[in-house]
Image (tube, rainbow, N blue to C red):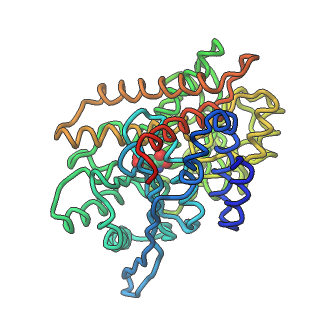
């Protein structure tokens, strides 16, 4: 069956699952030529099998809030594909979470994990629970109730969750604690754990650090470095924080961060203790960035706006899916941006990607740029399996090597005759070929 028919069948089968269909369509259109050269893929219905999750677990999560009132949420785990290794991927707690979003994330995760070179399959989970304004005790009770519904599907060689939006070290700790009670085993069935109970050094920084190592490689190919470049970052969570730290260390000037309330523009650069301010803003649990200007009055707050209207050399979406649209891309292009690298998953809309590629602006997709997070999770799994803990240098060196390798794979499959690298195509083909070959070798099952 040709790719376009597969896509329209999928649209008919899963109407309304827009994020999922968007992610699938992007990958399938990228790999179309390769797929057509491999009739054995068609014969074995590789794509039809690859676009459907192996399994979806959905469960009710009931917990008590601080007033003693009963609260209900929906929990999910989408175990997408384990051809390469155990299911692996984060957990997202956010009011917007639904099955379409988790299916898109699980699908992306499968290819991203393939790119890391480590043996990990793809999965994603989460809940429509909103951590905003919840007390620490409420977060803990919710995490425990969530694991009560999910623990039987997890295991160090079965499915290994981690964090995502709304899930950081604290939430992983609470979930892992409950999981450990239920199975009566201390195995590495979560990554992003605390350093005192099996966590890996550099894991909190890894997504941002890895992204900047990737950006360095993109720039090096153009004979450029990060020194003196201006950078717009969106978001102010863990990923934005790690990206700001490494960008600053490598000589760039980060001028924006953002939240659901708007964005901050700081002409002096967001460096040093200002980067830690992100952690303080996060710790309030209110999900707003405006208080930054009370501390640093030289900065400006733009309510309800996105940072992409600022003139910068590099744009790094670090918040959530579809946060940079066609109009934003046009504004960045008019401002002569040299690179848009997604650190969030599917940060750009298809219209934004089309505009960037059409104007030959380098665009790098999340599944390549942000793979350092899950790659370091893979390193955490290795350390847990060996019952030891590596030094910061050891983890950072391996992370850096993995990012160099992902960049090489993207160039190998994405370089065009005029020298322009279509990183989206490169990442999608490299990931697809690895998953497809693994499925082929394991037979029809
Ligand atoms: O999107 C991602 O790659 C993550 N949220 C991290 C997943 C992981 O298992 O570390």
Between 295 and 36, the residue placed more toward the observer is 36
The residue that appears at 28% across and 54% down in the rendered structure is 189
Give above or below for 328 relative to 154.
Answer: above
Q: Is residue 59 visible?
A: yes
Q: Residue furthest top?
A: 223
Between 439 and 410, the residue placed more toward the observer is 439
Left or right, 395 with reference to 234 = left
Q: Quadrant of residue 17?
A: bottom right
Q: Is residue 284 visible?
A: no
The residue that appears at 54% across and 53% down in the rendered structure is 49
Find residue 174 and report its horizontal and vertical position in percent: 30, 63
All told, the count of numbered labels is 0
Give above or below for 315 relative to 99.
Answer: above
Left or right, 243 with reference to 7 = left
Find residue 169 and report its horizontal and vertical position in percent: 35, 53
Find residue 55 and report its horizontal and vertical position in percent: 45, 63
The residue that appears at 73% across and 42% down in the rendered structure is 308
Between 442 and 320, the residue placed more toward the observer is 442
Between 79 and 374, the residue placed more toward the observer is 79
Q: Quadrant of residue 97?
A: bottom right
Q: Quadrant location of the C terminus?
A: bottom left
Find residue 417 and report its horizontal and vertical position in percent: 74, 17
Left or right, 284 with reference to 310 = left
């Amino acid at each position: 069956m040709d790719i376009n028919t597969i896509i329209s069948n999928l649209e008919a089968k899963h109407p309304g699952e827009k994020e999922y269909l968007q992610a699938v369509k992007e990958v399938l259109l990228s790999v179309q030529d390769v797929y057509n050269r491999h009739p054995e893929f068609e014969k074995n219905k590789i794509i039809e099998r690859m676009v459907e999750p192996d399994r979806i677990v959905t469960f009710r999560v009931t917990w008590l809030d601080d007033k003693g009132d009963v609260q209900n949420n929906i929990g999910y785990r989408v175990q997408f594909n384990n051809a390469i290794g155990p299911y692996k991927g984060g957990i997202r707690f956010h009011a917007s979470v639904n099955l379409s979003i988790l299916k898109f994330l699980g699908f992306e995760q499968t290819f991203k994990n393939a790119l890391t070179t480590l043996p990990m399959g793809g999965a994603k989970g989460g809940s429509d629970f909103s951590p905003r304004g919840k007390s620490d005790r409420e977060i803990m009770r919710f995490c425990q109730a969530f694991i009560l519904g999910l623990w039987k599907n997890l295991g160090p060689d079965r499915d290994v969750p981690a964090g995502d939006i709304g899930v950081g070290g604290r939430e992983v700790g609470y979930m892992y604690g409950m999981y450990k009670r239920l199975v009566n085993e201390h195995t590495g069935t979560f990554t992003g754990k605390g350093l005192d109970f099996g966590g890996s050094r550099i894991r909190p920084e890894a997504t941002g650090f890895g992204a900047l190592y990737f950006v360095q490689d993109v720039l090096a190919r153009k004979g450029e470095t990060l020194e003196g470049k201006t950078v717009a970052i969106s978001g102010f969570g863990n990923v934005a924080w790690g990206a700001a730290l490494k960008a600053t260390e490598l000589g760039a000037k980060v001028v924006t961060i953002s939240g659901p309330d708007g964005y901050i523009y700081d002409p002096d650069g967001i460096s040093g203790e200002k980067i830690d301010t992100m952690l303080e803003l996060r710790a309030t649990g209110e999900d707003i960035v405006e208080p930054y200007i009370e501390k640093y009055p030289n900065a400006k707050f733009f309510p309800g706006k996105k940072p992409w209207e600022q003139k910068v050399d590099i744009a790094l979406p670090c918040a959530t899916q579809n946060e940079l649209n066609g109009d934003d891309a046009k504004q960045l292009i008019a401002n002569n941006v040299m690179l848009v690298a997604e650190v969030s998953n599917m940060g750009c809309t298809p219209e934004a990607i089309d505009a960037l590629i059409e104007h030959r602006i380098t665009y790098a997709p999340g599944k390549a740029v942000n793979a350092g997070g899950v790659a370091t999770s893979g390193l955490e799994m290795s350390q847990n399996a060996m019952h030891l803990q590596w030094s910061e240098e050891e983890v950072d060196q391996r992370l850096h090597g993995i990012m160099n390798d992902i960049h090489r794979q993207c160039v190998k499959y994405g370089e065009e005759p005029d020298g322009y690298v279509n990183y989206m195509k490169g990442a999608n083909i490299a990931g697809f070929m690895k998953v497809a070959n693994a499925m082929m070798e394991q037979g029809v099952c």
